[in-house]
Image (cartoon, grey):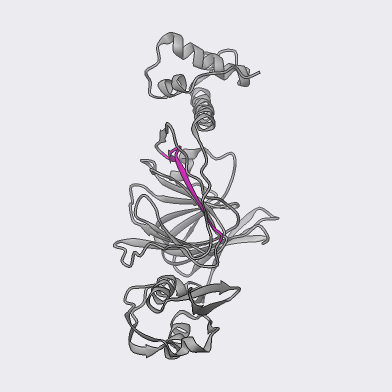
């Protein structure tokens, strides 16, 4: 039976401020569920390091279970998107995966050099729009309908770690000293300054990553990996460069690299373009957007075709253009399967 222990004592132990008696209490607590007679003195150096990792993980789990209070927030209806049009020294990532939630923890938080604080933010987009969010390092994330994203309120000193599911597009602020690491259900993707597409859906038998620019490393997600291993290149890791792709076969547990072509079409909606419209009707604007972003935008109300627009869309991707269009013309839009519908004016 696991003996009770106070959160305050665990935090004191982590900070190295325990007395000999208090340290003994922490070891006794660990023994209560690991059944190790002497967790330090009877082990060699490598075993002691492994034990330290176990104790540390157990302590973090105890602290999180005691401190984390979830506040679930769902994005429904038309989200209020933050307008950020320029990103200096940013890398781009499109992620397609499955499942998540939005919560915010409170009370005392603990900071881990890799994972950041135990205070966590999680977002679920339950609307039919693309929702934009800004991460603590100023990276931008666009969540497609039903997508979910989780990240710490403060990133760790060694890495910026997030987890996700559904479809998300990332513009990652470059920081070579703190790599950006994305975990999904099947794979782990490390961003070294690049633009790439990731797919990892529960209903699919494969997961894949396609690189457009820069460099990405991909590895199979494993429960046996130590956290610090995420910062190094492992033997099972596939390094990808432009026009390369890695496909993970879930049933065979195999990750294979391929040369690829035509990936640009899938990433076109996320590329920043320069478009200017001088008092143009919507019926003339839609064909331009369709051609520029390789999409199918439909106008559901004939009256909207005569709306006039005077706008500068320089440096915007399609989600930002749709948001600006919605505000400028007081119309709504919805993503329906593979098309985008422009709807009647918002009441």
Toward the viewer: 16 or 284?
Answer: 284
Toward the viewer: 6 or 186?
Answer: 6
The furthest residue to the left: 88
Q: Quadrant of the N terminus?
A: top right
Q: Residue at x 45, y 58 (%)?
A: 216
Where does residue 105 sit, x and y in percent of width and height?
47, 39
Q: Is residue 32 left or right of residue 92?
A: right
Q: Is residue 194 magenta?
A: no
Looking at the image, can residue 207 be seen?
Answer: yes
Region of the chain picked out in magenta, as a range:
114-126
Where does residue 312 sit, x and y in percent of width and height?
31, 79
257 up-or-down from 63: above or below: below
Q: Residue at x 61, y 17 (%)?
A: 32
Where does residue 298 sit, x and y in percent of width and height?
54, 83
Toward the viewer: 120 or 74?
Answer: 74
302 up-or-down from 76: above or below: below
Looking at the image, can residue 247 be seen?
Answer: no
Q: Is residue 119 magenta?
A: yes
Numbered disc total: 0
293 up-or-down from 94: above or below: below
The furthest residue to the front: 347
Q: Quadrant of residue 88?
A: bottom left
Toward the viewer: 151 or 68?
Answer: 68
The furthest residue to the top: 21
Q: Is residue 201 left or right of residue 196?
A: right
Q: Main secondary structure of the magenta part?
A: strand
The furthest residue to the right: 251
Where does residue 153 sit, x and y in percent of width and height?
41, 44
Q: Residue at x 66, y 56 (%)?
A: 250
């Amino acid at each position: 039976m696991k003996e009770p222990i106070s959160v305050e004592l665990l935090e004191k132990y982590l900070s190295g401020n325990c007395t000999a008696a208090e340290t003994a209490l922490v070891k006794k607590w660990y023994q209560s569920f690991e059944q190790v007679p002497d967790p330090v003195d009877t082990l060699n150096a490598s075993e002691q390091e492994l034990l330290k990792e176990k104790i540390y993980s157990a302590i973090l789990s105890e602290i999180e279970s005691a401190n984390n209070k979830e506040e679930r927030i769902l994005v429904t209806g038309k989200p209020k998107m933050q307008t950020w049009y320029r990103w200096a020294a940013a890398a781009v990532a499109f992620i397609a995966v499955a499942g998540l939630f939005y919560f915010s923890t409170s009370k005392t938080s603990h900071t881990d050099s890799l994972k950041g604080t135990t205070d966590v933010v999680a977002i679920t987009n339950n609307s039919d729009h693309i929702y934009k969010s800004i991460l603590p390092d100023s990276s931008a994330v666009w969540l497609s309908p039903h997508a979910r994203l989780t990240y710490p309120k403060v990133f760790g000193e060694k890495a910026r770690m997030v987890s996700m599911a559904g479809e998300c597009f990332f513009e990652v602020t470059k920081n070579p000293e703190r790599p950006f690491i994305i975990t999904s259900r099947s794979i782990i993707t490390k961003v070294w300054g690049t633009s790439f597409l990731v797919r990892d859906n529960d209903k699919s038998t494969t997961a894949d990553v396609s690189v457009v620019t820069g460099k990405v490393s991909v590895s199979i997600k494993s429960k046996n990996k130590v956290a610090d291993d995420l910062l190094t290149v492992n033997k099972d890791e596939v390094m990808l460069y432009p026009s390369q792709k890695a496909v993970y076969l879930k049933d065979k547990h195999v990750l294979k690299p391929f040369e690829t072509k035509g990936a640009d079409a899938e990433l076109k909606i996320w590329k920043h373009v320069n478009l200017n419209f001088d008092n143009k009707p919507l019926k003339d604007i839609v064909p331009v957007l369709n051609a520029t972003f390789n999409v199918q935008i439909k106008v559901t109300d004939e009256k909207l075709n005569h709306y006039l627009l005077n706008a500068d869309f320089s440096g915007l991707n399609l989600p930002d253009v749709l948001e600006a269009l919605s505000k400028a013309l007081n119309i709504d839009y919805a993503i329906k399967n593979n098309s985008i519908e422009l709807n009647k004016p918002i009441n």
